[in-house]
């Protein structure tokens, strides 16, 4: 279920999306500045000098594995769900519960939409300070979905990753704001309309 004002993630496919041969991937997402000039909530740019790094591992579902699954945000080893095992860097006191963490929630949206039947384990390396105005919550969400995307047999397009990452951003801001998500994902100066 989406937060109020949040676009729903794509529906679960009839057949789960196939995973590739990789079992882990790391991605960097740059900082960003949103609300540029008159572009409130629609115009932002990336700042490549700093950012967040996410490493995602897939843990295959084992026989008899059980856990709360994606909906609860936690999972037993090998069960479907998202588990945050570490947060390091300039910010460390963020929630480890996936549903309350921007990167964790973005991965949950991706996992739900694609029907991924494995646990996704996440470690975040925060390079963006809290309340710095540099889109730290967006960078974490983007880095997580980009890393997870690298684990798929056929990676999803950036426009689809944007929809998963924005679900994570809603955890931090209470509503959808793509002015930080889009520049962190696409790079450069980005105008977002009709999303």
Image: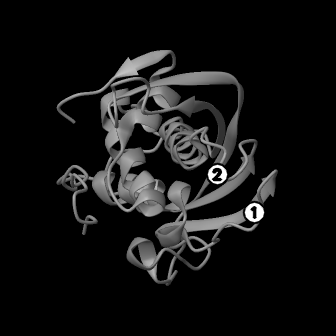
Q: Is residue 153 shown to the viewer in this render?
A: no
Query: Which sits in the foreground, 3 or 60?
Result: 3
Q: CA distance from mark 2 to mark 1?
A: 21 Å
Q: Nearer the viewer, mark 2 or mark 1?
A: 2
Query: Which sits in the foreground, 133 or 111?
Result: 133
SS for callout 1: strand
Vertical position of residue 147 compared to residue 170: above or below? above
Is 59 placed left or right of 115 in the picture?
A: right
| Mark 1 surroundings within 10 Å by alpha-carbon count, few (fewer than 14), some (14 through 19), many (20 or more) | some
Please tell me which of labels 2 and 1 falls first in the chain.
Answer: 1
Q: Residue at x 81, y 51 (%)?
A: 90
Q: Residue at x 22, y 56 (%)?
A: 12
Location of mark 2 (residue): 131
SS for callout 2: loop
Vertical position of residue 195 compared to residue 111: above or below? above
Q: Is residue 143 shown to the viewer in this render?
A: yes
Query: Which sits in the foreground, 58 or 39?
Result: 39
Q: Residue at x 36, y 57 (%)?
A: 109
* x then y, percent, for residue 85: 71, 66
Vertical position of residue 143 compared to residue 104: above or below? above
**Quadrant including the C terminus:** top left
- Kindly give the residue lying farthest to the right in the view shown: 89
Q: Residue at x 43, y 57 (%)?
A: 173
- Kindly give the residue lying farthest to the top in the view shown: 188
Is 25 placed left or right of 150 in the picture?
A: right
Is 177 placed left or right of 169 in the picture?
A: left
Looking at the rendering, which quadrant does residue 178 occupy?
top left
* x then y, percent, for residue 59: 60, 61
* x then y, percent, for residue 151: 53, 40
**Quadrant including the N terminus:** bottom left
Residue 86 badge: 1
């Amino acid at each position: 279920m989406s937060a109020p004002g949040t676009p729903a993630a794509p529906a679960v496919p009839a057949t789960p999306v196939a995973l590739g041969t990789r079992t882990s991937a790391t991605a960097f997402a740059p900082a960003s500045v949103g609300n540029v000039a008159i572009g409130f909530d629609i115009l932002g740019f990336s700042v490549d000098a700093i950012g967040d790094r996410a490493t995602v591992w897939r843990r295959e579902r084992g026989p008899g594995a059980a856990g709360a699954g994606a909906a609860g945000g936690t999972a037993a080893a090998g069960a479907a769900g998202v588990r945050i095992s570490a947060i390091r860097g300039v910010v460390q006191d963020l929630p480890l519960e996936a549903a309350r963490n921007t990167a964790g929630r973005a991965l949950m949206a991706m996992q739900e939409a694609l029907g991924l039947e494995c646990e996704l384990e996440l470690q975040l390396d925060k390079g963006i300070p809290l309340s710095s105005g540099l889109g730290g919550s967006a960078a974490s969400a983007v880095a997580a979905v980009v890393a997870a995307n690298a684990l798929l047999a056929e990676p999803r397009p950036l426009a689809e990753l944007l929809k998963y990452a924005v679900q994570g951003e809603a955890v931090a801001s209470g509503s959808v704001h793509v002015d930080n998500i889009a520049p962190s994902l696409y790079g450069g100066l980005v105008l977002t309309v009709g999303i």
